[in-house]
């Protein structure tokens, strides 16, 4: 049973998990608050982005870079985090990440131009990557092996709960204050975290002098940037109908190919892929990639859109509706961690995957314009339970399958897969929504009886006392709205299908040596 910091000793002479319960509670609160702040910021900012076109004198395509720049910076910073932790220690990297994130948040709030806010969002993204990896590994190391599931349940409480809570907080801040408060609210929290961390968090006593493979880092960064920008701008540019997307796709392929060649010939490798020789680790990463990234991230994107555009709720009310299932993520995450400690992580993952896939396919596709709001909120609760059950056991399973000295790398890979898988998931959701919306619009046009439609429009004109052009505009808007409404059914279903694909890797967990790998 591997522990990421198993070979680490604190300056007090203790192992990280040998601290007192009181110390464990204080350390966990500090670390979890940092992780919660970083993850929360991603969905809080999503809410305000459409409102920034005026203040920043740009259009919707311009403000999209506020999200894209953050995402790309975080993904790239992940690749260097393992080196920084081994070189300087988790505490120093965590506090450095919090300081960067806090300072960047302050300057984002002061920004008056798109260029300024993009620069500071890049710095924010770097801070988020440092916070997430170090907080993950620190809280895991503070708990003894028999309570690692509980540790990840507590961590999952913040990591899973924060994104769902973001729209509520973002809606409240923008409705009652202004968009700048979304960034300024991080400042006092970040300053308190740095102060508390300096005073209370324990220092490690051993650091390693490592050589860093800059060539592989640059090549993998180039490939990752190309991939994430392509996924972010694909829908806007019409995917492969655009020369830009074609160039980005080519750069992605070349970047990953050159990176592979660099790693084959390198003495000091950026990523040790021998981890994937362990079937539990390999399957766990694929479960994380497909169920969390390709499936859950689609629902994260779609549900706020459903409440705002189909149920036509204001931003704050839509956030409150999303909060209905977020509560259950928080409640069930620690429970799933304790269950993993009791019956084993693999069995808990199987239970979580079955519950998540079944409920998401049975309940979420039934949401439409005619669904009463209270019923829609109730139907999302099983989805929240499924999410709450998922995160802790998968994380425990992956980390326990990795060697002790590779725990940092395992967490880096999990977060990298989360970013890339989540980017694919969001791109799939937007692309599927557009496709099925147009498909339903065309089908409605085909099924219309021309004579009856002419009669209906004429009666509508007489009843409302408006011109025929206005009547056609109203009817056209109604058709567009209903095609959007029907499109959610197909898009929700497709998100669930990716969960089914991820469940194949859950089944492989119970097959002995599924890939026929000979292990020495």
Image: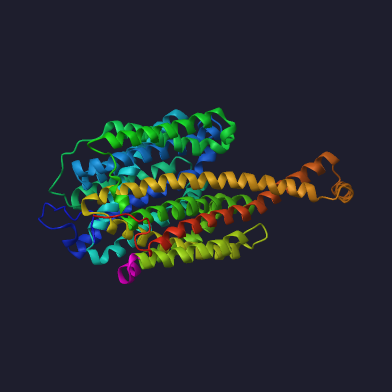
Depicted 163 relative to depicted 110: above or below: below
Depicted 18 relative to depicted 226: above or below: below
Observer able to see residue 519: yes
Which quarter of the picture shows residue 126? Answer: top left
| Residue situated in front as seen by the camera: 221 or 507 | 507
Report the magenta residues as a range.
Answer: 336-345
Question: Is residue 340 rendered magenta in the image?
Answer: yes
Observer able to see residue 381: no
Image coordinates of residue 47 in percent, x first then y, are: 51, 45
Image coordinates of residue 517 in percent, x first then y, are: 32, 54
- In percent of the image, x 58 and y 56: which residue is there? 493
- In percent of the image, x 49 and y 35: which residue is there? 230
| Residue situated in front as seen by the camera: 138 or 374 | 138
Is residue 297 left or right of 464 when viewed as pictured?
A: left
Is residue 398 left or right of 449 when viewed as pictured?
A: left
Question: Is residue 405 rendered magenta in the image?
Answer: no
Image coordinates of residue 445 in percent, x first then y, are: 78, 46
Depicted 406 relative to depicted 356: above or below: above
- What coloring was used for the rendering? rainbow
Q: Which secondary structure is most common in the magenta stretch?
A: helix
| Residue situated in front as seen by the camera: 396 or 480 | 396
Quarter of the picture holding the C terminus: bottom left
Quarter of the picture holding the N terminus: bottom left
- In percent of the image, x 39 and y 36: which residue is there? 256
């Amino acid at each position: 049973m591997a522990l990421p910091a198993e070979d680490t000793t604190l300056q007090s002479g203790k192992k990280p998990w040998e601290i007192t319960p009181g110390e464990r509670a204080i350390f966990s609160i500090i670390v979890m608050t940092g992780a919660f702040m970083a993850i929360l910021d991603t969905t809080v900012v999503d809410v305000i982005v459409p409102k920034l076109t005026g203040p920043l004198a740009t259009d919707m395509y311009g403000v999209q870079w506020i999200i894209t720049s953050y995402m790309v910076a975080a993904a790239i910073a992940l690749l260097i985090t393992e080196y920084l932790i081994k070189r300087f220690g988790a505490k120093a990297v965590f506090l450095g990440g919090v300081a960067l994130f806090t300072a960047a948040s302050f300057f984002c709030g002061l920004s008056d131009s798109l260029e300024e806010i993009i620069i500071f969002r890049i710095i924010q993204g770097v801070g988020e990557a440092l916070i997430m990896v170090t907080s993950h590994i620190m809280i895991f190391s503070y708990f003894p092996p028999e309570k690692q599931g509980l540790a990840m349940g507590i961590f999952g409480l913040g990591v899973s709960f924060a994104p769902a809570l973001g729209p509520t907080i973002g809606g409240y801040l923008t409705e009652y204050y202004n968009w700048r408060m979304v960034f300024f609210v991080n400042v006092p929290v970040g300053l308190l975290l740095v102060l508390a961390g300096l005073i209370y968090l324990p220092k490690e006593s051993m650091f390693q002098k490592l050589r860093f493979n800059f060539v592989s880092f640059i090549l993998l960064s180039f490939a990752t940037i190309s991939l994430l920008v392509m996924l972010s701008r694909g829908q806007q540019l019409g995917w492969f109908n655009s020369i830009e997307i074609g160039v980005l796709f080519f750069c992605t392929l070349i970047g990953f190919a050159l990176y592979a060649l660099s790693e084959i010939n390198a003495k000091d490798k950026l990523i040790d892929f021998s981890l994937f020789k362990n079937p539990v680790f390999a399957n766990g990463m694929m479960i994380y990639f497909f169920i969390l990234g390709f499936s859950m991230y689609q629902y994260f994107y779609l549900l706020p859109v459903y409440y705002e555009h189909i149920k036509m709720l204001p931003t704050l009310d839509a956030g409150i509706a999303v909060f209905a299932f977020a509560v259950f993520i928080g409640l069930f995450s620690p429970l799933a961690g304790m269950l993993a400690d009791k019956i084993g992580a693999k069995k808990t993952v199987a239970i979580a995957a079955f519950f998540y896939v079944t409920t998401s396919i049975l309940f979420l596709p039934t949401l439409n314009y005619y669904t009463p709001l209270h019923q829609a909120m109730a139907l999302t609760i099983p989805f929240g339970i499924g999410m709450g059950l998922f995160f802790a056991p998968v994380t425990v399973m992956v980390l326990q399958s990795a060697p002790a000295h590779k725990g940092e790398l395992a967490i880096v890979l999990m977060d990298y897969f989360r970013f890339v898988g989540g980017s694919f998931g969001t791109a799939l959701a937007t692309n599927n929504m557009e496709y099925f919306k147009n498909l339903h619009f065309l089908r409605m046009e085909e099924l219309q009886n021309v004579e009856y439609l002419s009669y209906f429009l004429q009666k509508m004109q007489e009843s409302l006392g408006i011109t025929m052009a206005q009547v056609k505009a109203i009817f056209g808007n109604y058709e567009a709205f209903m095609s959007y409404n029907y499109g959610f059914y197909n898009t929700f279903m497709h998100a669930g299908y990716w969960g089914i694909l991820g469940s194949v890797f859950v089944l492989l967990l119970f097959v002995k040596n599924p890939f026929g790998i000979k292990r020495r």
